[in-house]
């Protein structure tokens, strides 16, 4: 079973990419301030459910555990102004789906038995207000590439969810090699359907100009025709639905 808190953090910027990834540091007053500015921004308020408090940043979001990990997106010299170098530009969050949530997603999205045996990961992200464009796409590409290298692409499927009106997030996902595969209500009480995206390893490699690994060449996704309008149940009872839903892709 995959435990995300045992993963090391990336130590280098991949060729051609424009940001660095590292662990969040909410003990830094300026970084903590930026994290709250991200949370309070009107775009975040529009597309995310719930309010993140300081204790969430310090005790859960920044530290991670076996179910989730967060990468800080850091400005890189040569792309951002010197005043933004080494400062947080946003974050990328990775969540391991478990319990009923995992089962329903696999039942409704994957009919390929090989895919059903893989661990299901969910990625989301948020941008610091005013941060230079293109950085979150670069961060997502590097994050999912890193996950594939560390965990084995043959062992994981990476998903993302976004509202239909969240054009910015859809562009980020497309730029990172994700493909749209259908729609459903992430939780039964959601009013609107979410778009469902799955990472295509070959498209990711194309975006990064990297040769796909052998296991990626056979990575095809089968979509259930009845995916449309099929809601998901609440998340596993041992995890807070609000906390886990807060970082959904359609709420960045």
Image (tube, helix red, strand yellow):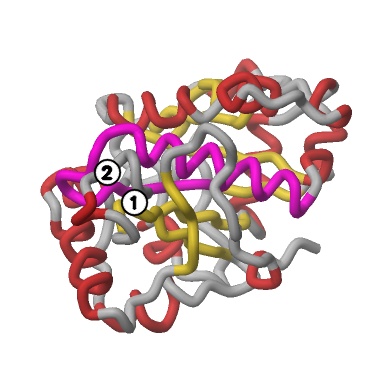
Q: Callout 2: few (<14), some (14-19), or many (20+) C-alpha neighbours within 10 Å?
A: many
Say which of 113 and 70 sits in front. Answer: 70
At a point 60% along the width and 60% down the height, the residue shown is: 11
Q: Is residue 104 above or below residue 229?
A: below
* Residue 217 image point, x, y percent: 82, 21
Judged left or right of residue 76, residue 47 is: left
Secondary structure of the residue carrying numbered label 1:
strand
**How many numbered callouts?**
2
At a point 41% along the width and 83% down the height, the residue shown is: 59
For residue 249, the mark is none
Which residue carries the number 1 mark? 75
Which residue carries the number 2 mark? 80
* Residue 183 image point, x, y percent: 47, 26
* Residue 146 image point, x, y percent: 65, 48
Check the image and name the residue furthest to the top.
Answer: 225
At a point 39% along the width and 48% down the height, the residue shown is: 125
Q: Callout 1: few (<14), some (14-19), or many (20+) C-alpha neighbours within 10 Å?
A: many
Magenta range is: 123-151
Q: Earlier in the sequence, mark 1 or mark 2?
A: 1
Secondary structure of the residue carrying numbered label 2:
loop
Judged left or right of residue 179, residue 106 is: right
Say which of 200 and 103 sits in front. Answer: 200
């Amino acid at each position: 079973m995959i435990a995300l808190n045992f993963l090391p953090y990336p130590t280098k910027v991949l060729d051609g990419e424009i940001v660095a990834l590292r662990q969040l540091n909410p003990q830094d007053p300026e970084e903590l301030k930026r994290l709250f500015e991200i949370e309070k921004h009107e775009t975040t308020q529009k597309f995310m459910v719930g309010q993140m408090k300081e204790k969430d940043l310090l005790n859960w979001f920044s530290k991670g555990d076996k179910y989730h990990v967060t990468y800080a997106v850091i400005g890189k010299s040569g792309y951002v102004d010197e005043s933004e170098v080494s400062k947080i530009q946003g974050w990328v969050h990775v969540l391991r789906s478990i319990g009923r949530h995992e089962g329903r997603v696999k039942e409704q999205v994957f009919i390929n038995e090989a895919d059903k045996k893989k661990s299901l990961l969910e990625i989301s992200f948020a941008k610091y207000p005013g941060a230079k464009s293109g950085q979150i796409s670069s961060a997502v590409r590097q994050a999912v590439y890193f996950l594939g290298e560390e965990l084995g692409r043959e062992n994981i499927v990476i998903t993302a969810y976004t509202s239909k009106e969240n054009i910015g997030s859809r562009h980020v996902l497309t730029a990172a090699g994700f493909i749209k595969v259908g729609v459903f209500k992430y939780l039964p009480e959601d009013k609107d359907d979410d778009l469902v995206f799955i990472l295509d390893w070959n498209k990711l490699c194309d975006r990064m100009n990297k040769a796909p690994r052998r296991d990626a060449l056979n990575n095809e996704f089968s979509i259930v025709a009845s995916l449309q309008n099929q809601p998901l149940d609440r998340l596993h009872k041992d995890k807070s639905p609000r906390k886990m839903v807060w970082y959904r892709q359609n709420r960045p």
